[in-house]
Image (cartoon, rainbow, N blue to C red):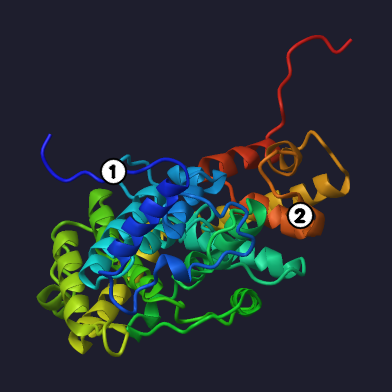
Amino acid sequence: MSGRRIKYSCGKGLDSSIRTVTDKRESLLSPRASISADAVRRHNRKPKDIRSPYSRDTDRIIHTRAYTRYIDKTQVFSLVENDHITHRVIHVQLVSKIARTIGRCFRLNEDLIEAIALGHDIGHIPYGHFGEACLSELCEKFGIGGFFHNVQSIQFLDRIEDCDLTMQVLDGILCHNGEGDDVKISPVPCQTWSLFDEKVQDNADGRRSKSPMTLEGCVVKFADTIAYIGRDLQDAREVGLIADSTTLPKKCSEILGASNQEIINTLIYDLLESSDTEERGYISYSQDVESALIDLRTFSRDHIYENKKLTSERDKVKKMYETLFVSYLDDLEGNKRNAKIFTDFIDTNWISRTYLETASGAELVRDFIAGMTDRYFAKRYEDCVIPHRVEGKFF
C-alpha cells in the first residue's frame, strides 16, 4: 500500500495524536471559520472523544428518532403519489452537500456545516408549511404561542431528546430559515447560553433572528434556498404540475438558467464571487442574481406552492389537525394510558424526563403531532374518526 499513514499510539497518546491532526487541519481554515476550540456545550457530559465537537454533533443528530422520521416527511407535494419527488431526507442531504461545497471554497468548517444542514429541518411537520400554519393556529388557541419549525427543531434536539449539541450547531439550525433575508448576511455573535435561550424565545414569539452566530450557519442559510428553489421546479415538472414547455420569467431564465442544475450552478458561483468571508466576513449574492431569485420565488409561489391542484385539500388537512389536537388533549386529561400519545411518546424511553416534567399538556400534544410523519399522521386521524372493528362474540 502506498501513501502516507498516520500512526496513532494507544491510551492517552491517542487523544493527543488525534488532537494534533485536528489542529493541523483546522489551521488551514479561514481565520473567521469556527474551530473545535470554539465549540460550547450546555452540559458536556462526554468530554473525551476522537471526533471533533461538530462531527460528534452530526452523529448525535443522525441517531435521533427525529432524524429517522425525515424519511416520510414530504417537502412540497404532500398529497402526490410519486416515488421520485423530494422528501425532507433528500432535501437535507442536498443542503449538506451544497453547503459543504461552498464552505470548502471559503475554507470554513465542513463538520459544523454538515451538522447544521442535517438538523435544520427536523422541526418540520406533516403537510409542510401549510401544516405549520394549522398547528400554529391551534397552539395560539390553546395558549402556548405560535408554532415555528425552526424553534421546533431546537425543541426536539435540545429538550425532548436532549442531545447536548454545541451552541454553534443549534444556533445555525435556529437561524436557517427566512429566505428573504439571504441578500447579504454577516454572523452576529452569541456569547452565552442565556443569550441563546433568549434568541430561541424571540423566535418563538415571532421575532425571527436573521443572522446565525457563525459564517458556517450563514452558508447553510443560503444553501437551503439553493437546494430547494430549482429542485421544486424539477419536482413540479416531474408530477405534471408545470408542463415542460412552461417558461420561467425571462430574467430568471437568462440570469439563473432554466433547469435545477443550471440554477444551482449559477447561485453557487455568484455566491462565491460576491461574498467576502476573509476580511469583512459576509455572505452575499450580486444584485442581479438576487433580483432574479426574488422573481423565481414569486413564480414558484404562484405556479407551485399556491397552485389549486395542491391547495384544494387544505380544509381537510386543517380539520385533521384540529381533530388530533383536541383528541390528544382529551387523552391527557383523562390519563388514557393506552392512547398513542402515551404509548408512542410520553411513555417511551428516549424522551428526556426533565422535558416531560416541565411541559404543559398542550405542549406535549404539539410536540407529539409535530414529530409525526405524514403517513403516521394520517393513520392517527383514521383512528380518531373511523370506528374500530372487532371480531368475536359480545354475548
Quadrant location, the N terminus: top left
- Horizontally, residue 116 falls left or right of residue 242, namely right
Q: Residue at x 48, y 65 (%)?
A: 169
Residue 199 location (% of width, % of height):
59, 78
Inspect this view and state whether residue 312 appears. no
- Horizontally, residue 134 falls left or right of residue 249, namely right
Residue 33 location (% of width, % of height):
34, 74
- Horizontally, residue 254 falls left or right of residue 326, namely left
In the image shown, does 246 or 27 lie closer to the viewer?
27
Whole-angstrom CA distance, mark 2 to mark 1, is 43 Å
The kind of residue on which mark 1 rests is Lys
In the image shown, does 239 or 206 lie closer to the viewer?
206
Disc 2: CA contacts within 10 A as few (<14), some (14-19) or many (>=20)? few
Q: Secondary structure at mark 2?
A: helix
Q: Residue at x 24, y 68 (%)?
A: 102
The kind of residue on which mark 2 rests is Thr
- Horizontally, residue 363 falls left or right of residue 257, namely right
Residue 132 location (% of width, % of height):
55, 62
Give the numbered dot on residue 232. Answer: none
From this view, report whether residue 318 is shown above or below residue 187: above
From this view, report whether residue 365 is shown above or below residue 197: above
Q: Residue at x 27, y 53 (%)?
A: 235
Give the numbered dot on residue 7. Answer: 1
Q: Residue at x 55, y 60 (%)?
A: 153
The residue under label 2 is 354
User: Nearer the observer, disc 2 or disc 1?
Assistant: 1
Inspect this view and state whether residue 32 appears. yes
In the image shown, does 291 or 156 lie closer to the viewer?
156
Residue 86 location (% of width, % of height):
33, 50
